[in-house]
Image (cartoon, rainbow, N blue to C red):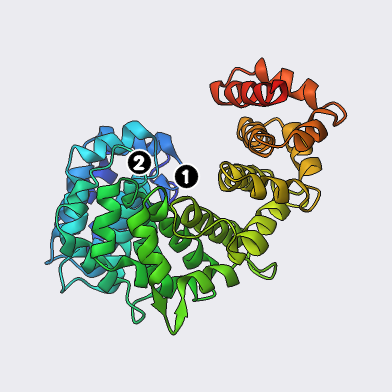
Amino acid sequence: MEPFTCFMDVENSRSYIDELYSEENCKCQEAIVCLKNAVIGSNKKKGSIISQGIVPRLIALLCNAGKPLQLRIDAGIVLGSLAKGTESQVHSLMRFNIVEVLITIIFDASTNERLMEACLGALQTIVQYPFAPLDLLHSDINNIKRLIQIASPRSSFACQMYVVNIFVPLCHSSHQQKSLCQAEVIPFLARLMICDNTTLQVPALKCLAAMCFTNKSVSNIVHATYHADRSILDILTALLSRTRDVQVQLSASRCLTYLHRAGSLPAEDYRIVYKTLPCLARLCSDEFEEDTRATAAETLAYLAEIDSELQRLAAISNHLIVSLANLVKCPSVLSRQGAFRCFASLAANDEEIRKRIIEMDGLMEEVLSGLKDGCAEVCAKGVEMMENRSV
């Protein structure tokens, strides 16, 4: 069976479908390899597979400990690929209790590491969706602890990568943040933050930032936590260095920003004044990708939002106002929103800063244009700019 030709027309490939249900493992293996190759990158073929009712067979193969290991792994890989389809396709997978199936295999101590990786990869994809049943993981703190064990330093790189990415959407509510803290996820994140691998560092930092956001109790724990004789604050500060990957710098600066706004770091702390603020101002400059600049502007706006001294320092940092003026001209809604919000934050309390912003060539025209933008967020930030102008 040729893996790419046999499945060019899934709807008419009855022989292919029949072999997927064969009790002869070699025929079933050939069919599932063909299936695996066919669904990669094709939502149409993913939809066809789901509509033909093949998902229960894939789940049965995945769960059958009597089947060859490679067959089970490939079944997990195909399910993970289906989870990368459209939202409606993922909803269809949910009807077969796919998350429960994956968790059962992942938490089985006898599961082979390669099979574990396939299941973790599928779970990581699914939990990113807002309708994913995250309570299945949060229902028992031992589930979180087990995931941390699975991602131990002795585990494969893939296991560690999947687990830390699974944690990112698990920490948005205060209850979830508390649960992760109790499971001792902070030391786990700290270990990944110092591993010098961007693929692990960035999700670890994103998770830590989400846990600290508007949560003073978690932020205080982070403030007091040490790993390998270094405080997490010192680790985060070191990650702001220009020598680090840009996304690492940005994510670390967001952590420190949220620690400050949660009340665990004062505005005059050197890590805020001399490290975080200059880093964010630099990341707003034109040398960086547009999405990086937009996120940096949003974060800087939040950092300086309630402190007039930080607003003053930001306004004189690294040609920030010019950088924001250039960002306003970008077509992306998120870029314009980030720039407007940062301008509004800088101009909130200081008449001199407000005047500098207003007098920038062409800037007020961009603000007025923002008021006409179809996006409600851009309109809101434009209005905020105009209100500050009129104070």
For the point 47% across and 67% down, the residue is 200
Q: Residue at horizontal 50%, vertical 61%?
A: 202
Kind of element beneath mark 2: loop
Residue 281, image x, y percentages: 70, 52
Inspect the image, locate mark 1, and give the three-letter code of the amino acid beneath it.
Gly
- Taking depth in this image into account, of 82 and 200 the one nearest to the observer is 200
Mark number displayed over residue 388: none
Q: Position of residue 120 (x, y in %)?
A: 31, 60
Q: CA distance from mark 2 to mark 1?
A: 19 Å
Residue ranking furthest to the right: 361
Hey, which quadrant is residue 315 in on the image? Answer: top right
Disc 1 is placed on an element classified as loop
Where in the figure is residue 304, as x and y percent of width and height? 60, 46
Residue found at the far top of this picture:
372
Mark 2 and mark 1 in contact? Answer it, CB < 8 Å. Answer: no
Image quadrant containing the C terminus: top right
Q: Label for residue 129?
A: 2
Left or right of 367, for residue 162 = left
Query: Which residue is located at x 61 percent, y 27 percent?
Result: 381
Tag 1 residue:
41
Q: Residue visible at 85% across and 31% down?
A: 360
Task: Identify whether 44 is placed above or below 306.
Answer: above
User: Which one is closest to the eye, mark 2 or mark 1?
Assistant: 2
Residue type marked 2: Tyr
